[in-house]
Amino acid sequence: MLEEGESADKNEPADKQLEMLENVQFIYELALAQLELQVLGARFELTNGLRKFRLLGVEDEERLRRRLAYFKAVRGEQTDYFQIIQRNRTRSVNQYLTHWIYPYKGKFHLQMIRALLNILGLERGETVLDPFVGSGTTAVEAELLGINCVGIDVSPLCVLQTRVKTESVAVLPEIEEWRDEILKRTGVNLFNIENKSLDAMINSISNEKVRNFYKLAELVAISDSARRKKEFFSALRTNLDLMVSSVKDFVEVKESRNLELGKVCVVEGDARDLSLSVDSESIDGIVTSPPYSIALDYVANDAHALKALGSGSLGSGRRLGYSLSEIREKFMGLRGKGVARIKLYNEDLRRSLEEMFRVLKPGKFAAVVVGNATYLGKEVKTVEFTINSAEAVGFRLVRNIDKIIFGLYNVMQKEKILIFTKEGA
């Protein structure tokens, strides 16, 4: 924004402007766009049209073009992000590259995460933590920006999909080698007595990253069969084609934009105790959203996939052998009933905030996206509790941004983007 007393040439030509993407439509996105410009060293003025900014000066124009989330062009040249979002294989917007893989409720808005990584000042080679990694949005966007990411989740399904979305780019040739073999020998001829089961074939793949890719493809087909009543093997073939094409897009974007991808480490773990995975004061930034499990039963929503995953294998090939009831006991917000359920959720949230404070480096920032849920007909004041608890453990709130959400399938209609800092040097 303009500093006091600063002026701009109103007749400045178009090539001096910053042009926003057409899909930017909410006030909070405009606020985030201005914050990321400031952090990335740009001086600017918002024009009357609200979709273009007059660029007054910038410390590093190339860096601006490569990192911005909400802009189509800088001085007439397209941003990296505009190029990346062209690689969209679905009918939904903002589901480019591998982001779309597996239908997961409560997902982050992708542009918002890229913007928050910029706003928190995270640089290439630094490390961001998402202790509720969910569908892996933070991990994918950090990877694209060259930022390392540690992702933690209690759900083995979330761990699997995040690994596939971020790791498959490194094993594309092997994925392509297995694709034809799997489609040829599995489910094509139902009367072929020599046809191996899909699980057996997937489990025979020695490369863990390739094996995970095909396990997730199976789960996507199971989801389509359970939710959309699609024939399983038809869904498998369709989704495999899309998944392989999306990984190809990822590889092509990496090469064409000369991206040095960040390193991603995703593990199954508990946000309330990160001691086995994350050292104290080792993290450069946190971007996360606690689960809305009071409003959304994640285990019930993905029960079909979790059952299938539990009957197969993950990672090293070990049998998982867990039950849905055991998984529910590990999830925040799914334990207890009535008032006790809210109390347990709040206790878990406080403990997770304590862990975030412990692992974050002094002087760094944490962005927490959270909203108030409705439970038993009453509003649960999660936002207020989050702010109070975060400040009690030592954080200081520096930004509180309203995030209004529209859409038939959104669990929450209004959220807050809370940005905290851990003070000290």
Image (cartoon, rainbow, N blue to C red):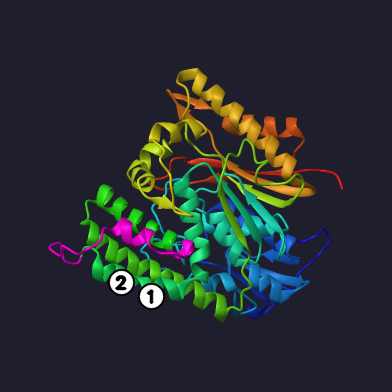
Secondary element at image label 2: helix
Q: Please say if 257 is above or below 103.
A: below
Secondary element at image label 1: helix
Question: Which image quadrant for residue 79?
Answer: bottom right
Residue for badge 1? 177
Where's the N terminus, which quadrant?
A: bottom right
| Magenta residue check for 197 | yes
What is the tally of numbered marks visible in this picture?
Answer: 2
Towards the viewer: 12 or 142: 142
In this rendering, does residue 87 appear at all?
no
Residue for badge 2? 181
Q: Residue furthest left?
A: 191
Q: Position of residue 237 (x, y in %)?
A: 28, 66
In this rendering, does residue 213 appear at all?
yes
Taking the image as shown, residue 229 lies to the left or right of residue 353, namely: left
Residue interval drawn in magenta: 188-210
Three-letter code, disc 1: Glu
Task: Say which residue appears at 52% left-offset and 39% top-offset.
Answer: 291
Q: Position of residue 190 (x, y in %)?
A: 15, 62
Question: Which image quadrant for residue 270?
Answer: top right
Task: Say which residue appears at 42% left-offset and 49% top-offset.
Answer: 104
Towards the viewer: 256 or 148: 148
For the residues bearing labels 1 and 2, Cβ distance under 8 angstroms = yes
Q: Residues within 10 Å of mark 1 (few under 14, many from 20)?
A: few
Three-letter code, disc 2: Glu
